[in-house]
Amino acid sequence: MEGTVTGSFNEMTMQNGIPLTDEMQLQLAERYGGNESWGGPIMDPHYSAAWAWAGNTPFKWGKQVGSHLGGTRDPMVVHWPERIHDLGGVRTQFTHVTDVGATILDVAGIPAPTRVDGIKQEPLHGVSFADSLVDADAPERHTQQYFETIGNRAMYKDGWWLAMKTPRIPWVLTPEALKPYAPKVWDPDSDPAELYYLPDDFTQARDLADQHPEKVQELRDLFWEEAERYKVLPLLATLSAFFGITPPLEAADRIELRGGVQNIAPGMIPRIYNRSYAISADLRVPEEGAEGVIVAEADHLGGFSLFVDGGRLTHCYSMMGVFVYRQQADTPLPVGEVNVRLEFAADAATPATGGQVTLFVNDTEVGGGRMDHTVPMRFSAYAGMDVGRDNGGVVDLSYADRRPFAFNGTVKKVVFDIKPHRKAKDEKAVHTVAHHAHAAHGLSS
């Protein structure tokens, strides 16, 4: 439900704290194809919290909210003609996703493996629901289960459900809304608790907490026991836990990638955000001239590509698809052994900083330009980095019909030199601001 009140044509705008008005959203959606392109490969939409709420009806809340059925309950269809004879029948036994694997092993007559490739396995946490497939009145076998997402948590046992939701509204992502849930500030036991008896209350409409305080305490205590047993602790209510935003690597200021490396995961990519940096590549250019991608990260809705087009060194930088900057060299690359370099001189070591791009070939300046805004947190949660090609969605749509637009010569290596090398406390301060998803306030002005 983090899609905010308006939703977005690109879900990463929300994660980067880029405030877009309704008018800007419509303009950007039209830029990328309008309604006909919505949901296709050209856009990465995140629908509004209102649609999420509607889609979860009749249950309360939704994604992020592991305390309520709107954020946890999903339908499941099982097709097994040889054993299930009441076509269209409904089962009401409490069942958890961890039960699916146990059930498949059960009906196949295969014991759960204790070792895989010589490695000892943890026991399955689920239980088989195979008997309920053939008997609608079979007893419930999964009798207790914890739930937790971003601090929103629940404890189920024998029909009783204790919902413990943080007071934060999921689609409100301002720093003021997030600060009370920082580590060592938030007290989970101060969150309100709601108690429901699901056999008589399918939609969690009747809160029984005031009538059964002893049951509230029993389930609250049981949650902490289960949280410790299943490695839920420490309990975190910040968005870093949800989005996988890790603290910066203080020593990762120079990173060398060899040619041909592909599909580097987002968490392993050099972090060029909110600072100056340089990207240098050693190439071997063929007699017919150079063409293709040297190094690229993510795609046209947030990413960068350093490539050669028409023989000329080119840089494209997409600031989440909101702003797209392009610089190109004045002359073609020479044949043979060539070094190309991109330098970005940030205006300041602050989130979403602007700065100047300069392109070099064999240490000679050949082009450049200004970028007024850069990405404060990350280009993508999914798309990675490639050396020598641009796999998947491309960064520069001008070569979309030539994808993956592999370099026709040799990319020997690519070196990222990330500057300035700030002190650890300064680096963490910048990271904290970006983490609170409000780094790019100036973009709407």
Image (tube, rainbow, N blue to C red):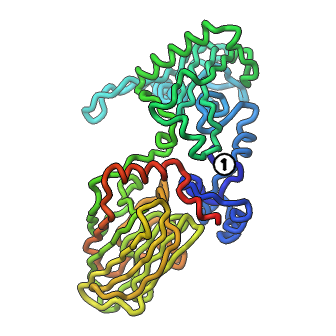
Residue 77 seen = no
Residue at figure coordinates x 39%, y 73% from the top left:
344
Depicted 166 relative to depicted 51: above or below: above
Image quadrant holding the C terminus, namely: bottom right
Q: Give the residue drawn at x 48%, y 70%.
A: 354
Q: Which residue is mark 1?
A: 4
Question: Residue 279 at what x, y percent from top left?
Answer: 33, 72
**How far from the left and from the top, in percent, is residue 62?**
65, 37
135 and 288: which one is in front? Answer: 288
Residue 47, x across and y down, in percent:
68, 51
Nearer to us in this view, 273 or 219: 273
Please give the name of the residue rendered at 47% of the width and 25% of the height, measured from the top-left corner.
Answer: 102
**Amino acid bearing label 1:** Thr
Q: Looking at the image, is 102 positioned above or below residue 44?
A: above
Identify the image quadrant of residue 346. Answer: bottom left
Around disc 1, counting alpha carbons within 10 Å, would you say few (fewer than 14), some (14 to 19), or many (20 or more)? Answer: some
